[in-house]
Image (cartoon, rainbow, N blue to C red):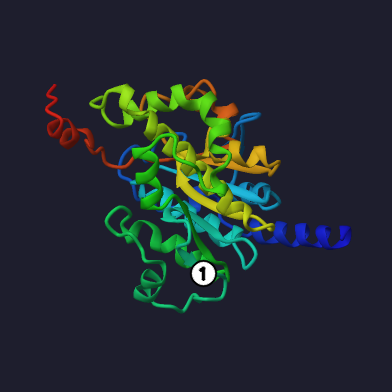
Amino acid sequence: MRITGMLLAMLLSVVVLLLPHPSQAEQWLSPQLQEHPLVGQVIRTRDGAVLSQSELVLALAPVPYVLLGEKHDNADHHQLQQQLIRQLTNAQRPLVLEMLAEGQGVVAGQLTAQADEPSIRQALSWPERGWPWPNYGGQIQAALAQGGGVEGANLSRDEIMTLMQDPTAELAPRLASTDQILPRVEADFIEVLYEQHCEVMPREQLGGMARVQVARDASMAAALMRHGEGGVLLAGGFHVVKPTGVPAHLALAEQPSVSVLMLEVAEDLAAWQAYGDDLARDFDYLYFTPRAEEVDYCAALKEKHGHTD
């Protein structure tokens, strides 16, 4: 086994060293701040080391569960995910998606890289309304090209509605870690949800939503752990925070994971440490990208609730 592991590591080293550095590989798609000094940099947060994409792949490859956190509307995040997924998924290591519910997906070999887009979307029952296919089709096809499966990880709509209507509703066995983690994160989650909902919903109405959020993370962790060889999760950045998100649920089961946050640069922040006080606690790696076009998601919600600035 030692010899096999060494040979595998040597082979992987050769493969990843052939990958171009991000500054050479990327044609950035997001229009804002493409010339920012942090764009394209991969930061290892424990020591501030700057890595190439090849070095990042080499670091991620041995860890069973790799968690890729994104900003959902940033095209560069989707492009970088495709590159990493090509290197990290295979028949034993599926792509696991926040965008699909538990039970949705295709197993390794069910579809091939030659399958056309309509066939893939139909097989996945892809939820176009919430998750535009152009944002995720490339990542899915990249996993299929490596012979891997594509699996859903989120709560079903019925599970969400049950938990929202009855915050004490019994949890499915795969969600058992929810009530272990909820007490220590509930207050913080309510504040995050309050901000995400544009400060128009009273905090006292967000307790059920906080439990749903933790249950989502439990469901994603369970989906990953179904595969002893590991998996690659694609989810929003908040889901991959180490002390509170999917990594916390994996840690309860003593399953190692690594968390990568794809992060938009800010014009007035030129040092990576300026992007948060707890980055080393919350994420293992940061991958900086340009900013997407700004969209005011709050305008319609505030109008709906009768809030005006």
Q: How many residues crowd around disc 1 within 10 Å: few (fewer than 14), some, or many (20 or more)?
A: many
| Residue 28 in sight here | no
Number of marks present in the image shown: 1
| Residue 146 in sight here | yes
**Is 22 rendered above or below residue 182?**
below
Residue at 39 percent across and 63 percent down: it is: 137
Query: Residue 91 in the image: x percent, y percent?
Result: 62, 68
The kind of residue tagged 1 is Leu
Q: Secondary structure at mark 1?
A: helix
**Is 157 rendered above or below residue 90?**
above
Picture quadrant where residue 198 is located: top left
Is 129 positioned to the left or the right of 289 in the image? left
Query: Residue 63 in the image: x percent, y percent?
Result: 68, 48
Query: Residue 213 in the image: x percent, y percent?
Result: 43, 38
* Viewer-proximal residue among 170 and 202: 170
Q: Which residue is mark 1?
A: 144
* Viewer-proximal residue among 58 and 188: 188
Residue at 52 percent across and 56 percent down: it is: 96
* Viewer-proximal residue among 258 and 268: 258
> Which quadrant, please, contains the C terminus?
top left
Picture quadrant where residue 36 is located: top left
Is 6 positioned to the left or the right of 126 in the image? right
Residue at 32 percent across and 22 percent down: it is: 203
> Which quadrant, please, contains the N terminus?
bottom right
Query: Residue 300 in the image: x percent, y percent?
Result: 16, 37
**Is 262 rendered above or below residue 266?**
below
